[in-house]
Image (cartoon, rainbow, N blue to C red):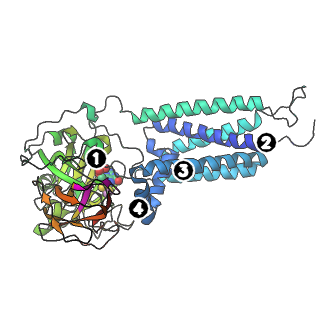
Amino acid sequence: MTDTPRRIPTGPAAIAGLVSAVAALGAAEVVGALLARPTATPVQAVGAGVIDLTPLPLKQFAVDVFGTADKIVLIGGIAILLAGAAALIGVAATRGRLFGAVGTALFITIGLTAALTRPDAGPLDALPTLAGAAAFIGVLVLSIRFPRVRGAESDTPADGFDRRRFVLLAGTVAAASAGVGTGARLLSAAPTGGGLSPADVRLPVPVDRAAALPDGVDLELDGLSPYFTPNTDFYRIDTALSVPRIDASTWSLRIHGRGVRRELVLTYDDLLRHPELSERDITLTCVSNPVGGDYLGNARWVGVPLASLLAEAGVRSPAEGGPADQLVSRSDDGMTIGTPVADVMDGRDALLAVGMNGRPLPHDHGFPVRMVVPGLYGYVSACKWIVDIELTTFDAFDAYWVPRGWAARGPVKTQSRIDTPREGADLEPGRVVVAGVAWAQHTGVDRVEVRIDDGPWTDAELAAEGSADTWRQWVLEWDAEPGEHLLTVRATDREGRTQTPDRAEPAPDGATGHHHVTVTVA
Ligand SMILES: Nc1nc2c(c(=O)[nH]1)N[C@H]1C(S)=C(S)[C@@H](COP(=O)(O)O)O[C@H]1N2
Ligand SMILES: [Mo]
């Protein structure tokens, strides 16, 4: 036996830190679920804070590289950092109490700061982190003390550290915490009992149906995006780390602010039973969509005309002397989106949508209610999980994305995309179908041209137009000759604007440039 202080070896000390972190996350999840505040748990809150603080170019980089998996990557990154820090704290704690205490305090501070600075935070949001902190300290102390053997039994290990006891303790705590934490997370993700979720809703038949589609809006070609994007394939872009699951039976929307003569508070039922419930086909586009990207989709929406609700509230458009030029939508998760009042009151079909492609809105796309405005990018119009509409001015308020480097106003830019053939395709010589979509919402697509290599621009054949608010398919038959070829597309809208070849990044107000694909003909 030795008289030197008995110290836990480094490996087990690091594991003790890790296990304590697992216990902390489990405890935080349980408290988050009990409070029905899954977004207040430390990992979610820190993740949301990181999303808010990430500078624009980095965010764009993340979207470009990881696409809509960016959030999984973010959470994975936080988990790795957390694991590393927890292991360090474990080692530090066995080397000196002060080190352990400082590390732990730093952890708790980060978690608390993140949880309490969310836009929708309340004081109770500190509880998941505090519970996690208590579990962390408790398990760390226990796993450092418990396996230390005091007696001088014959099988006492030379370093006074009983590995069997340690493994037993660490294994039990880790398994139990992971189990309980996962259970709590699943519970809070499940629809709350008694609430009204998409599966419970039967949408009424809209009073004002969409105009019948002309024959040939959908060319139904292999590799070409279908005219309507199925809900399950519809792109999803938002800052929500966990999708808000709202009970439609208790949901309401308040319309208030400058120039509102009668404040409105609307329930889900008020919208479903609205005498002007309308059905419209509208193509939604994200400002972050790179040239050739797929952050856009077309759906048949059912909703109440926003202009009618604003008129009910006594709002006048700026054109009629109304004092508000900006309509700020707020979501349940604290997003703010600013839309020009002039646009939503100029006669276009701006909707408070409850239905998407014949179904109630899916949770991912804003259940129970979201906004959709033809001709504006999503970040300035398409607020999901909307709970509040405030009439104000662009001078008085910057919505979420504006201080982060995006333009306050975001009309959709006329664009086109080649869907087939794909980039890098190997083709047989002879007849090749080149097809894609073009969009200029609320203006309409007038012409699409394709260029092979440095050849002349050739008119593609346009599919029938559903409406000016939707994308339009196009097709061109190309007689392909052997070699490598560059196919380029450009669209011209009904106001005579032809897409510029000049490349611009999505920020601050939408990408420009021509989409092209390179193919090889054998
Ligand atoms: N609450 C909330 N609404 C939001 C967003 C968001 O981050 N939070 N993102 C907007 C953006 S940038 C776009 S492009 C559209 C995307 O809608 P979708 O996910 O249904 O395709 O939602 C908009 N509405
Ligand atoms: Mo977007």
Mark with earlier residue (1, 3): 3
| Image quarter of the C terminus | bottom left
Above or below residue 443? Residue 190 is above
Q: Nearer the viewer, residue 218 or 509?
A: 218
Tag 4, which secondary structure? helix
Q: Which mark is residue 399?
A: none
Q: Which residues are magenta?
A: 416-430
Amino acid under disc 3: Ile
Label 2: which secondary element:
loop
- What whole-number distance in Å separates the C-alpha atoms at marks 2 and 4? 44 Å
Mark 4 vs mark 3, CA separation in Å: 19 Å
The disc at residue 9 is 2
Q: Which residue is mark 4?
A: 60
Q: Earlier in the sequence, mark 2 or mark 4?
A: 2
Nearest to N terminus: mark 1 or mark 4 = 4
- Gap between marks 1 and 4, in whole Å? 20 Å
